[in-house]
Amino acid sequence: MNARSAEEFEAHLRSIGEKRYHHLHPFNERMHAGELSEAEFRGWVRNRFYYQLNLPKKDAFILTKLPGRDDRRRWITRIIDHDGRTGDEGGIEKWVRLGGAVGLSREELFDVDTVLPGVRFAVDAYVDFCREKPWLEAVASALTELFAPGLLSRRIIDVEKHYPWIAPAGLEYFRARLVQQPKDIAHLLELVIENAGTKQQQDACARALEFKCDVLWSLLDAVELAYRKSS
Amino acid sequence: MNARSAEEFEAHLRSIGEKRYHHLHPFNERMHAGELSEAEFRGWVRNRFYYQLNLPKKDAFILTKLPGRDDRRRWITRIIDHDGRTGDEGGIEKWVRLGGAVGLSREELFDVDTVLPGVRFAVDAYVDFCREKPWLEAVASALTELFAPGLLSRRIIDVEKHYPWIAPAGLEYFRARLVQQPKDIAHLLELVIENAGTKQQQDACARALEFKCDVLWSLLDAVELAYRKSS
């Protein structure tokens, strides 16, 4: 079977996100419609923090296997964006501030033993995927980023509008990601499209994206079910 | 068995390096005495480059398992020191310049298929150690750095003195390491001494240092034997 052209391949990847990215998840739709209770919003922030905490680890696994220095130089900024550095608090700390804005203490957030099991299984599966798979597939699992800017920009508007009890400063994480993500997306597309030269590699990249859509979807499933039960 | 005090533990680690660090290796002693042929010096630069190339990978494995963000923030500078970033060429590129100064092209250096088998085995074993072992032992395997500044400062002087055919600009890698390494050593000692709380952990750290001394020693063994045979 012939490989898709670069344009066809990118269009195929985008079509996967349009069908399976978590912007379509009922819990996310309720968030944007202003229908989440305070407990539900807080539950999402708290459990999603486990995902945020693990991003530098999965990116460090990718760093161990990227083929060269130039790509490591570009990929390493993802870790720094989340961990921060002197004079730049970083994304994890910004998420802690979002936690503060919804009434969660730093201690509650870092107490990862209380993360919902379904969230833990999904996030750990993502880290394991990046540890075990060849670099191209590990990298391709980040392709959900293609669909993030649209979701993030709507989220900032909708959350400000519907949840006035959340201080706007709490949303700084999302604003920062809108600025950081374009460089990551450009590098990601370059790596995937230039290096998936065969139909087999393109299919493996598409499956990696589908897997990652499942991770994000499953995370929201777990949060939705946990807070539905308790309400 | 009781754990050693912090002072006793550090003294024990230092005593290991005094006996087993590669400053005592005959090939290194000949380098400092001005006794290496041009072919031998070039062989060392070329084969040691494989070690240099793998440092960011082993540090990325450590990054995947360090317990927290603050330590990752400090450890990540090791990767950047070697890979470089915009406006800072980094240690790998400086070693390429050392290669140029001894008559090796960039292509020869990056052609890792021609690395001596003994060098490959030793370096791969080091990366595997950092991949497989708990973070404390992986970190402790870097403890050979305690002994590097003394060796590096002598190396700059002795190589300039004995090998006038090597342009001094080629030694920039060693000068840069003298500046970068103190921050790494401070973090390393802090991590190892504060976290090896039991006698068992202290012994595991000491074994990690011995293992790493063996890696460096074995690398020089391979170079020494290869060029003795061909001369």
Image (cartoon, coloured by chain):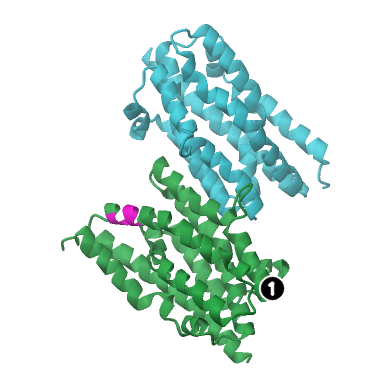
Chain colours: A green, B cyan
Q: For the point 59% across and 35% down, which residue is it?
A: B212
Q: Position of residue B97 (x, y in %)?
A: 42, 23
Q: For the point 33% across and 57% down, which residue is it?
A: A189
Tell me if I can see residue A158 in this picture: yes
Magenta span contains residue A173: no
Q: Position of residue B178 (x, y in %)?
A: 61, 26
For the N terminus of chain A, the quadrant is: bottom left
- Residue B112 in which image quadrant: top left
For the C terminus of chain A, the quadrant is: bottom right
Q: Is residue B172 left or right of residue A114?
A: left
Q: Name the chain under label 1.
A: A
Tell me if I can see residue B29 in this picture: no
According to the picture, the residue beneath numbered tag 1 turns out to be A104
Magenta span contains residue A192: yes
- Looking at the rendered structure, the kind of residue marked 1 is Leu
- The correct choice, above or below, for A157 with respect to A38 in the image is above
- Residue A92 in which image quadrant: bottom right
- The correct choice, above or below, for B38 with respect to A23 in the image is above
Q: For the point 56% across and 23% down, which residue is it?
A: B175
Q: Is residue A160 left or right of residue A5?
A: right
Q: For the point 66% across and 51% down, which residue is it?
A: B70
Residue reaching furthest left? A2
Predominant secondary structure, magenta span: helix
Q: Position of residue A116 (x, y in %)?
A: 60, 77
**What residue range appears in magenta?**
A189-193
Q: Is residue B1 left or right of residue A127?
A: right
Viewer-proximal residue among B130 and A107 = A107
Please tell me how crowded label 1 is: few (under 14), some (14-19), or many (20+) other residues with Cα within 10 Å: some
| Element assignment for label 1 | loop
Q: Position of residue A151 (x, y in %)?
A: 44, 72
Viewer-proximal residue among A36 and A153 = A153
